[in-house]
Image (cartoon, grey):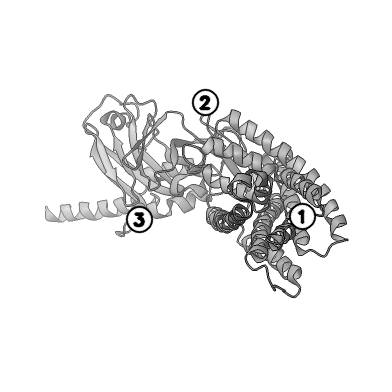
Amino acid sequence: MKTSYLTLIFICIPATLSTSDHLPNCKDALEDCLHQEEPWTRCYEDRITRCIQRSRIPIPNFCRWSVNSSNKAEAGMDSGHRVHIPAHALQRSKRNDSHTTGYVVHITMAVLNSSLFKLGPVRGNRLGEVLRQSVLAVRVGDHGVSDLDQPVRIAFRNTNVTERGTCVSWKESEINKGEGDWSSEGCNTTLIRGEFVCSCNHLSFFAVLVNSKLSVDPVNAANLGYISYIGSSFSVVFTTVSLVMYTCLRKGSSEQSIGIHMHLTGALLFLHLSYLLSEWWVWHEADGAEGRVCLAFGLMLHWALLSTFTWLAIEGFNLYMLLVRVFNIYVRKYLLKLSLVGWGIPTVTVVACGFSGVYGRHSFYMKGANNGSSTDICWISSAPDSHGVVVSYVTVSGYLGLVFLFNTAMLGVVVVKLWGQRGKGRMWKDWATVLGLSCVLGVPWGLAFCTYGPLSLPGLYLFSIFNCFQGVFLFLWFLALLHNDRPERPSVKDSSSQKMMETNLN
């Protein structure tokens, strides 16, 4: 009897091993599916439902457990994701037998990187970037579950309270094989105690699209776009005229300030030209805006913006030299050294950024009735696998913040000196000087920090108007200088101060 049992055991063991040999290894499921001709998402959903774990070592970001279909299921992962599956969804997981209760069902969860999901060329329905680049795959049983009466709830941990999120699931494209897009259909989003809770009526690949930056509706986005295009076009024309007039004026003057004004005007001309060309290229190429040309336009726009910021800072430095250290100041080859700084810092920065591969198409997101849309520009890439966010915060926001603080302080010095010269009663006569210097020092660029919070939309309009038309304002300021540049007889008491102000303005 014992011999027959042993014989049966030795017969069953090889049969069991032979059967398990044909099952895929859960650890290799993703890598194997990525090399298949069929869409890897379908292959992966199939494999994780029937794969086995051949190693006792836990697979990172992978979890599987079994529950009774008559009970609800709840589980969490080390990544912070939590899932609540009602009993109704578990009972629907058994093929052709949805009314049966009490059987065991397998639940599989896996966390994937969002860069694996290839977005199709369809534009206008993307809400933002994937939260922490994290996508959660949830699978119950051996086939898809949809149209649930009781929703499945998935919680995504959110550490940034300023982010606005929308729950989405992956939807394969019916036209382009292997591509797809994120869809909010069938999912509702709730923010509860620092977590995005997604209530969805189906099981799939889930994620949260967030946009920590400002989102505006399509109408205001269109208005801001018109302001930007018109303002930049006018600025290109007027900065060109200003450069010609500065060149003619400098022939009969050795004043260093005129040379600094010329460099700033040139940087602004490059900035507005780069912006218009970048926008035109994305519009012209539509969905094919990716590539070396868009990379080049993005690099050029970044370089022009950094050059503008640097020359704004140099204007503030020159103002400091004229107002605070007005006596006995001589710097050999002063303008040449400033030029090396003004054009050198931006060049070194964009070259380093170019080698890191951060330039490409950037999407700005808008909210609306159709769950949002996007508009693109060649700039620092918004792709989740790039370092664009860090580069943007350091080289744009951080750099602008430093320039804004320094130049605002210099403008304060001018106001104090004018207050002391003119007195309170005549201060209103110098409003043109203060406004002109505000434009030259780039103080309106500080409105960029007002595009967050309750005043975000008015801040965007003011920012667009003042900075897109900055070339026009500089031209008007230049005309005002020419009009006021005529001989006067200052009193002995304030002759040095008057000379100092004229030197700075000219």
Q: Is residue 280 above or below residue 255?
A: above
Mark in the foreground, 1 or 3: 1
Can residue 325 be seen at all in this image of the molecule?
A: yes
Q: Is residue 239 above or below residue 180?
A: below
Q: Is mark 2 on a helix, strand or loop?
A: loop
The residue at 64%/31% (across/down) is: 223
Q: Is residue 119 left or right of residue 441?
A: left
User: Residue 145 at what x, y percent from top left?
Assistant: 38, 31
Q: In this view, does 365 lie above or below 351?
A: above
Image quarter (top left, top right, bottom left or bottom right) of the C terminus: bottom right
**Of callouts 1 and 2, the N-terminal one:** 1
Can residue 50 be seen at all in this image of the molecule?
A: no
User: Residue 208 at what x, y percent from top left?
Assistant: 44, 40
The Cα atoms of the two marked residues, 1 and 3, are separated by 57 Å
Badge 1 density bin: few <14, some 14–19, many ≥20, Cα 10 Å? many
Closest to the observer: 242 or 399? Answer: 242
Mark in the foreground, 1 or 2: 1
The residue at 29%/35% (across/down) is: 85
